[in-house]
């Protein structure tokens, strides 16, 4: 199919209609968009001979034809921008697939052309000094080491181990733990179903695996249960 011939013949027909933009209040108002017959990225000007008024649908199809004719990066990018205005769901799958493939191809070609110049390669390589590479490597290693440690701890502390630890806490051990922190008014928390008391909300959270915020909301009567259990301060029983 001769896309260029179809494009030029249709725009010549539209231009012969001598369309004009009317006021929105006019009874004969039709929404038009100004289109550059020769795209600006291809050397098109703002002259009236290079401008034509198109409806929104005609404008969309005109830019689609331009992607078929020129396959230029900026032409493809302009067509993508039109689709972002109304959402990509409005584009049919075959047209979208074709457009994305062409856009990626042109991006790759532009990147290869840029880095084929020794000056550009030297400029890009000069950004990553040895000091920047070292800092980036250290931050990456630190991030993944923390992530792996958290995964390992989560795997070790199974629900059975948490329950076993909870049952091993005697009242004497809880009092000893509570006395380690001075200057802080601790309140014992009791699980109503098990009858086990904990010296603080944080200890109860660590021992049972129930979130601290959930325990706090439960003992302050903002929610009924936390972790499937009822909780209360011992001095409120």
Image (cartoon, rainbow, N blue to C red):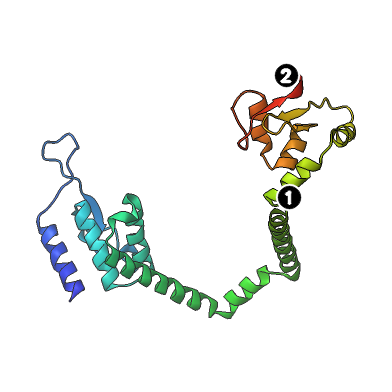
In-image side of 227 versus 13 (left or right): right
Who comes first in sequence, dot 2 or dot 1?
A: 1
In-image side of 65 versus 185 (left or right): left
In-image side of 52 versus 144 (left or right): left
Element class at badge 1:
helix
Locate the N terminus by quadrant.
bottom left
Locate the C terminus by quadrant.
top right
The answer to whether residue 52 is visible is no
Q: Which mark is residue 236?
A: 2
The answer to whether residue 203 is visible is yes
Instruction: Decide which of 235, 97 is in the foreground and name it.
Output: 235
- The residue under label 1 is 161
Instruction: Decide which of 141, 213 is in the foreground and name it.
Output: 213
Element class at badge 2:
helix
At which x and y percent is residue 233? 73, 24
The answer to the question of whether label 2 and label 1 lie on touching residues, with beta carbons closer than 8 A, is no
Packing grade of label 1 (10 A; few <14, some 14-19, many >=20) is few
Query: Residue 63 is drawn in which quadrant?
Result: bottom left
Instruction: Decide which of 77, 234 is in the foreground and name it.
Output: 234
Q: Which mark is residue 142?
A: none
The residue under the point 40% across, 73% down is: 106
């Amino acid at each position: 199919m001769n896309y260029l011939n179809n494009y030029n013949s249709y725009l010549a027909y539209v231009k012969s209609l001598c369309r004009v933009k009317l006021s929105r209040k006019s009874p004969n108002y039709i929404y038009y968009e100004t289109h550059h017959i020769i795209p600006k990225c291809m050397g098109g000007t703002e002259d009236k001979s290079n401008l034509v008024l198109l409806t929104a649908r005609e404008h969309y199809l005109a830019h689609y034809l331009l992607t078929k004719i020129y396959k230029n990066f900026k032409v493809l990018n302009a067509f993508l921008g039109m689709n972002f205005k109304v959402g990509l769901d409005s584009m049919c799958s075959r047209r979208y697939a074709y457009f994305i493939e062409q856009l990626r191809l042109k991006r790759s070609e532009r990147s290869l052309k840029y880095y084929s110049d020794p000056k550009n390669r030297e400029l890009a390589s000069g950004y990553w000094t040895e000091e920047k590479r070292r800092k980036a490597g250290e931050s990456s290693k630190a991030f993944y080491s923390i992530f792996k440690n958290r995964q390992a701890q989560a795997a070790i502390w199974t629900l059975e181990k948490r329950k076993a630890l909870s049952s091993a806490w005697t009242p004497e051990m809880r009092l000893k733990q509570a006395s380690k922190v001075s200057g802080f008014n601790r309140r014992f928390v009791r699980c109503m179903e098990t009858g086990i008391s904990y010296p603080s909300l944080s200890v109860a959270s660590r021992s049972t695996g129930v979130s601290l915020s959930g325990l706090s909301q439960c003992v302050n009567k903002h929610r009924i249960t936390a972790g499937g259990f009822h909780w209360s301060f011992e001095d409120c029983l």
